Image: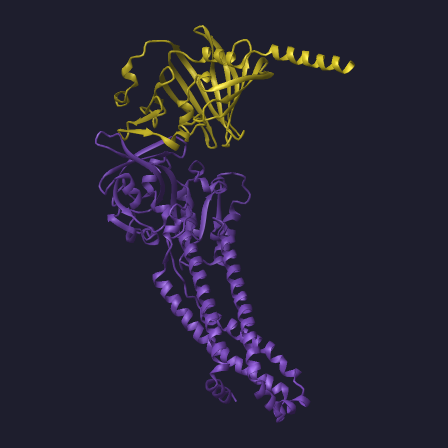
Chain colours: A purple, B yellow
Amino acid sequence: MIKFLMKGLIRDKHRSLFPALVVILGVMLTVLLNCWVKGIMGDMVDFNAKFLTGHVKVMSRAYAENVDQIPNDLALVDVDGLVEELRRDYPDMEWVTRIRFGGLLDVPDDAGETKAQGPAVGLAVDLLSKETKEIDRLNIQKAIVRGHMPQIPGEILIGDSFAQKLGVNPGETATLLSSTMYGSLAIQNFTVTGTVVFGVNAMDRGAMIIDISDAQMALDMQDATGEILGYLKSDMYQDQKAKRVQASFNAKYADTQDEFAPVMLRLPEQNDLASMIDYIDSVSGIVVTVFVLVMSIVLWNAGLIGGLRRYGEIGLRLAIGEFKGHVYRLMIAESLLIGIFGALLGTAVGLGISYLLQTYGINAGSFFKNATMMLPNTFRARITPEAYYLGLFPGLVSTVLGTGLSGIGIYRRKTAQLFKELEV
Amino acid sequence: MKNRIVICAVLCFYGIALGQYPDGNDVLNDIDHNLSSRNRIVTSKMVIHGRRGSRTIESQSWVQGTEKSFTEYLAPAREKGTKMLKLEDNLWMYSPSTDRTIQISGHMLRQSVMGSDLSYEDMMEDPKLTNQYDAVVTGTEDVEDRECWLLELTARTKDVAYHFRKIWVDQERKVPLKQELLAKSGKLLKRLEMKDVTWMDERWYPKRLIFKDMLKTGEGTEFIVDSIQFDVDIPDYIFSKAALRR
């Protein structure tokens, strides 16, 4: 039967080409949009996890309440002991200390006076330890465009556009002006060893990367840190695992009222990521639904037109004794075949375009030139396992629905009138 | 007829009430006479109350009029030797540990000094209120058992840090005992209280000031005057960038 229907579809292109094209286009767009949205969401989550939130983050309660202000005066103290405790109790995770800070970077002239200065956004990570993974995690080595990595204390990296604005080159001195953990003035000279481009405008405009021991000395934060980030060893965020670790850790400090007691937050609980992820998921679902409805309506219309064109054929088949239900079911079967073909081809085309977008991406940096949000400049698609079968749903449902609605007219044909029509 | 008498009585009463309040600008002049001087040398302590405890910073300042001031921080060890120089609208800072002279400008002026509730802008402010504000006396109130005029000040120019001020001025001593500094929107930004008002050098002068940044949590910053000398000779070289590195 399938062979018979296939022959009919191939020979009579009028009843198959247009519906197939509609399904191919609709499925292609569905798959492409899904991969694109997943890519953007995945990039944002990855980026935030690597640079800002970790998979989990430990801060003091007071710091957590004001985290947007990077309040280092509310930082965690006795951190060496705390990190040892985390590594012992949660060996499946990697724990790193980081300090974020703001300040002014001042570049001196020959007389030691201000030549140029600009606001700096500082990130202190472990750059100098042999076993550090922070350099790879943050892709720092690959981001260097001029100079080299810091190799000894007192050396820093700054954003390349920031360096150009200040007129400072690798090998030259810059002075950080900031506040210590206790509110005092922090002034420290550093040597700029290299410049970096992260591809994030908000960072490249004022980024300053220093070794964590330098930050602790400059900001009077011995055995203290702003944040302890935890990463699952798989490098992929897994919410259930993170929830278990969080529940276990926070339970230890549940009874204390101390505002400087540590508290752990998961990735979705920071930077409004949960609501953003939910929003993107909802949008993705809504788009797929809308595509299904629109395609169904188009195919319904196509089915009605096809029904008109096949009026005679169907009338003859009914006249020679074929049951209405049988005709209807065969039409549904035809639409299923068209749907499968269209969905497979549409998925293939959609995946092909998604692969190109995954490899090359779209550079939207010019739109976020003055943005202060941490967004990557280049947005890429991401092909996920569900992209391979997602297109089948709209492809099949829309063709079946469209044909089903348009085919109802068969049941209104009256046998008594058939012969009169056939006379014509 | 009866209505006319009532209206006249009300107007007379209002007129009498107004006549009892002095002119706001005259009160401002009296304040400036007490608080301003040709020059002064001040040794002071700034006690900063933070969430993790209190810190005390000692300093010595040389001030000439409203345009020049030089401050050297004496304690604690981390701050010792740090100097600041203000010349008109420019501010420089010298750090002995880095041997750098850094100019502070733009938005940095709004940052807190040493983590206190004062900003660099507050420190650079023209202390003579008559130069920047128009004042009206709007009432009386008691502050710490002292009868005070309530002055409402409105800035004449746009380039002031606080567009509105409310000042409670001791009627007898002509010294502000309390100030509220407000933004153009009316939002309260800072509160100052002046205590330990002492007679010295033919003027009343507060020896303790409490600044509170209303946008920050915490107990504020105390500024305690240990010693002050008015109208003494201050060599010109003090107010130069070279003096920062001495």
Vertical side of A166 occupied by A26: above or below: below
Residue pushed farthest bottom?
A: A320
Residue pushed farthest front?
A: A424
A412 vs B40, nearest the viewer: A412
* Residue A159 appearing in the image: no
Expressed as whole percent of the image width and height from the top left, the position of residue B84 reads 33, 23
Expressed as whole percent of the image width and height from the top left, the position of residue A3 reads 48, 88
A196 vs B152, nearest the viewer: B152
Question: Residue at 41% of width from left, 23% of height from top?
Answer: B123
Q: Quadrant of residue B87?
A: top left
**Tally of numbered discs:** 0
Vertical side of A186 occupied by A250: above or below: below
Expressed as whole percent of the image width and height from the top left, the position of residue A412 reads 66, 82
Q: Quadrant of residue A181?
A: top left
- Determine whether, in the image, residue A258 is placed left or right of residue B82: right
Vertical side of A207 occupied by A314: above or below: below
Q: Quadrant of residue A112?
A: top left
* Residue B97 appearing in the image: yes
